[in-house]
Amino acid sequence: MVEDKILTKVRIQELKPGMFITAYTGFAAKYRSLDDKTCRFIQHNFRKAKATVARKNKEQEIPVEALKINDHLKKIHDLPPDLSKIQSVSDKLQQALKARGFLEFDVKIKGLEKEEKRELKEAIDLVKQSTLTPSERKERYQQAKQNAEQFVQQLSENVQTRKKASRAVENIMDDARRGKIDYSGIIEYVEDITKHASSEAMMAIVSLKQSDQTYDHCVDVGVIFQSSYYKIKEMKKEKPIFDNRSTALLGAFLHDFGKSKIPKDILDSTVRFERESREMKLMESHPKFGAELLSGMKMPEAIVNMAYYHHVKQDTSMNSCYPKNVDYNSVIYESRLLSIIDAYQALVGRRKYKKSWNPPAAIRYIDALAGVEFDFNAWDDFLSVIGLYPKGSLVELSDKTIGFVMSVPHENLERPQIAIVRNEFGEDLEKNTIIDLELEKDIGIVKDLDIEETFGINALSVFSSIQID
């Protein structure tokens, strides 16, 4: 009979799939004197568990709900069954724990003999993968080449589609401002994007081309939402709540429809308004306006919910949360996902008047807010489909070459396929090669790069000119 084996103080780098965490026992320095945000993060993500803390030089055991600012966290334990998601170790969980500063754990392994056999099989599979025959490597390369070429072509083709869809959003907002409520002008673009499955390619345009803060934003949020939402539902084997993809895309396009009630000089202003100013009060009214307009248009309840709640934070007491005095339980999953995508696009969207974030940097930033500002489960789902390095991200590799990310790997999010556009000597290439980091184990990403700083206004042109040799 194989018995459970208890291992104490396993370090983060020693965690392996198949282990089950029974307690969190080692933490980064920031947990030695908890601030308000970290307290709330732990209370949300470890609800109903117990914590051991040092408070006023005295160690005591308390429910995590009783954590206070300045507590020195020593241990999180007695985790309830409904927290199995942060106990069953996977590569993905290990990466998340490392990013959040959890360093040591008590774990147990059930069925050690079975686990050892599984690890042996994984090792064999890894050896097989790394020693593919020449014909197998060629076949994999050809598939990567074909996918990359198709992606570049779709992106190039949809630049104009995005521009026209953005103009249509502007037109329906202008019409609504004049009292004419009609969204028929945007339907053809919704149908076109859905029919040609171009949402994923359009997602990469966000960080490659300068855009408008309102109308392009609506289109970008729409295509990112539609693409990621349906991938998540397929991955989780769940049924979408929308009748079809076009309805989901339309709803996300119209999430800011309430801005049509805001004077255009305020809406299009690039000036940062003071929080208590009249202009900011008007801007923060757009979710309420949008819900009213969409309800009057007989839009599905889910679309109304998305418009009303997409600026609501998990911690509803935050100043950046609006409308005020709402119950977070009223925010449906789709609205929680949309709020993440809304923030992501606002960070990476290139504007003439502000410096944008690199997509991987935006991912890391939002990741740090998950569980406090954004719903952790919705974020976890989004991260699994967009990756640590979203398609179109610019990165530098360990061999000093520079390239664009062309895939989101299913297993290791840190090992995508890269189209090399600049060699180790700093020379831009006319013909490009694909590097598959899941196969090329001796090469890795060392940092993500600012696309605008690297290529300036020519970023989209450089990407569109990729020709895989």
Image (tube, rainbow, N blue to C red):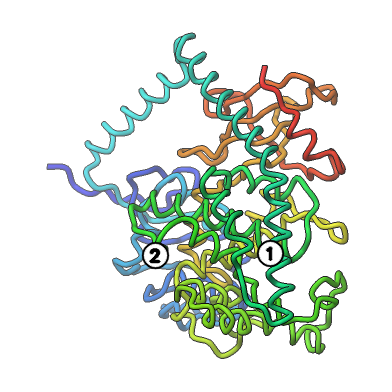
Do the CB atoms of the residues marked 2 and 1 lie less than 8 Å apart? no
At which x and y percent is residue 271? Answer: 87, 73
Classify the position of the C terminus by image quarter. Answer: top right
Label 2 vs 1, first from the N-terminus: 1
User: In this orientation, which residue lies closer to the viewer: 38 or 350?
Assistant: 350
Mark 2 packing: few (<14 Cα in 10 Å), some, or many (20+)? Answer: few
The amino acid pointed to by label 1 is Val
Left or right? Give the position of 156 relative to 380: right
Image position of 192 with respect to 137: above or below: below
Tell me which corner region of the image, top left, top right, bottom left or bottom right, holds residue 294: bottom right
Name the mark on residue 381.
Answer: none
Image position of 311 with respect to 191: above or below: below
Residue at figure coordinates x 61%, y 34% from the top left: 151
The amino acid pointed to by label 2 is Ile
Residue where numbered disc 1 is placed: 169
At which x and y percent is residue 139? Answer: 48, 16
Cα distance between the residues tagged 2 and 1: 24 Å
Residue where numbered disc 2 is placed: 241
Nearer the observer, disc 2 or disc 1?
A: 1
